[in-house]
Amino acid sequence: MIKVAVTGNIGSGKSEFINFISKLGFFYISSDVIISNLYKDDKTRSIIIQKLDLNEENYKQEIINKIHNEVFNRRLKKVIYPFLYSKKKFLSQKHKTHQPTFYEVPLLYEENLSHDYNVTVFIKADINKRRRRVLNRGVSKNYFTLMNNKQINENIKKIKSTFTLDNNGSILNLRLNIIRLLNRL
């Protein structure tokens, strides 16, 4: 199975990439979608909240407030990653005949996961464009800054990646770049 990791800093266009390839009929596994679904599942959310000693009513805000704390951040990963990896493994086994399979992995290089993939695609976008995209989703400037600062420099990601797609233009431009990439895989 050809495993293609898609990464990029916050607001770079990873979700747009995944949405477009899924419309083209490619199979994908999204870390962000899996984690979002973990919190939507009552039983799993309860386990996470209990292990992190969070308040049920405002756990999302508590996580955002505490995520800058490295001790809490390590605990959060220790609690969530086993759920995430288990679900990824299940999905990849279920769909192992799909060629290639795309994996949206926001922290690919930060978590040293690139060795798990045959090909890595980095989506690069100017910080001002990324900030504007994130703020248009209703996310605060502080959250953008916090998450952006947790990610390694884009130039390092570009050097480490098999392919880099520029996403400073329109959605159409990104889609054309994706089609060019698919022809090279």
Image (cartoon, rainbow, N blue to C red):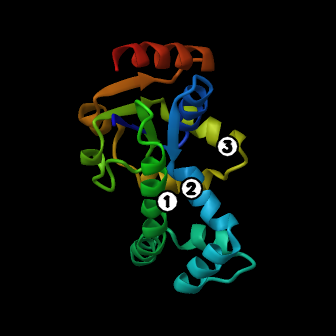
Q: Looking at the image, tell me whether mark 1 or mark 3 is earlier in sequence order.
A: 1
**Mark earlier in primary sequence (2, 3):** 2
Secondary structure of the residue carrying numbered label 1: helix
In the picture of the structure, the residue carrying the numbered disc 1 is 87
Q: Quadrant of residue 78?
A: bottom left
Residue flagged by tag 3: what amino acid is it?
Answer: Leu
Position of residue 139 measured from the top left corner of the image (x, y, whole percent):
67, 50
Q: Position of residue 39 (x, y in %)?
A: 64, 66
Q: Nearer the viewer, mark 1 or mark 3?
A: 1
Horizontally, residue 6 falls left or right of residue 1, namely: right
Q: Position of residue 62 (x, y in %)?
A: 62, 74
Residue closer to the observer: 9 or 68: 9
Q: Residue at x 64, y 59 (%)?
A: 37
The residue singled out by tag 3 in the image is: 135
Q: Are marks 1 and 2 in contact (CB under 8 Å)?
A: yes
Tell me the CA gap for discs 2 and 3: 23 Å
Mark 1 or 2, which is nearer the eye?
1
Asked whether residue 5 is in view, the answer is yes
The mark nearer the N terminus, 1 or 2, is 2
How far separated are the C-alphas under marks 1 and 2? 7 Å
Please state which of residues 82 and 12 is positioned toward the viewer in this rendering.
82
Task: Name the kind of residue labelled 1 in the image.
Answer: Lys
Check disc 2 and report the residue beneath it. Answer: 34
User: Which residue is found at the position 64% from the left and 80% from the top?
Assistant: 46
Residue type of the residue flagged with mark 2:
Ile
Image quarter in which the N terminus is found: top left
- From this viewpoint, is residue 8 visible? no
